[in-house]
Image: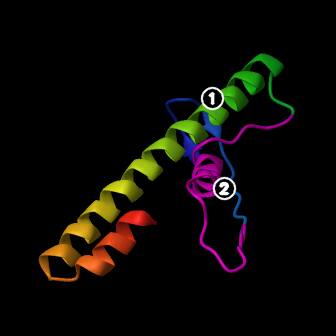
Amino acid sequence: MSIPALDLNVTPTFTVDVKTTSNRGFTPEEVAERCAEKIISISDTANPVIRDQARAFKKHLIKVLSFYMREAIKSDRTTIYNALSDAGHQDLAELTRRI
């Protein structure tokens, strides 16, 4: 792939990365880390100043993504709580709220 505006020749590299958990789903932090890996990558041989800045940005991005994923989870649980409550399942709604 060539990016003319930057005059770079970029060779696409295709890698498969598999992550698993045992008896649980992924935490927001784990998903955020996977997301950040897809958004930001930098070579170990890059200019040290740029490399360090990219790594610091990636750490910050993981924290931001984790925060908003937790917010999305809370919001979704509120939606589920309200749907269960509206359907007359107050006991299930309350259990959902406590998760």
Residue at horizontal 70 percent and vertical 73 percent from the top: 21
- Residue with the most extreme right position: 45
Residue at horizontal 39 percent and vertical 48 percent from the top: 71
- Residue with the most extreme top position: 49
Q: Give the x, y percent position of residue 8.
A: 63, 35
Residue ID for mark 2: 12
Residue 32 is one of the magenta-drawn residues: yes
Residue 16, compared with residue 40, is above or below; it is: below
Residue at horizontal 59 percent and vertical 72 percent from the top: 25
Q: Badge 2: few (under 14), some or many (20 or more) residues near its Cα, within 10 Å?
A: few
Residue ID for mark 1: 57
Please give the range of residues in magenta.
17-44
Residue 78, compared with residue 3, is above or below; it is: below
Residue 33, compared with residue 54, is above or below; it is: below
Residue type at numbered disc 2: Pro
Mark 1 or 2: the one toward you: 1
1 or 2: tag closer to the N-terminus: 2
Q: Give the x, y percent position of residue 18.
A: 72, 71
Q: Badge 1: few (under 14), some or many (20 or more) residues near its Cα, within 10 Å?
A: some
Judge left or right: residue 68 versus residue 14. Answer: left
Disc 1, SS:
helix
| Front residue (pair 47, 33) | 33
Residue type at numbered disc 1: Phe
Identify the image quadrant of residue 81.
bottom left
Q: Give the x, y percent position of residue 39.
A: 57, 45
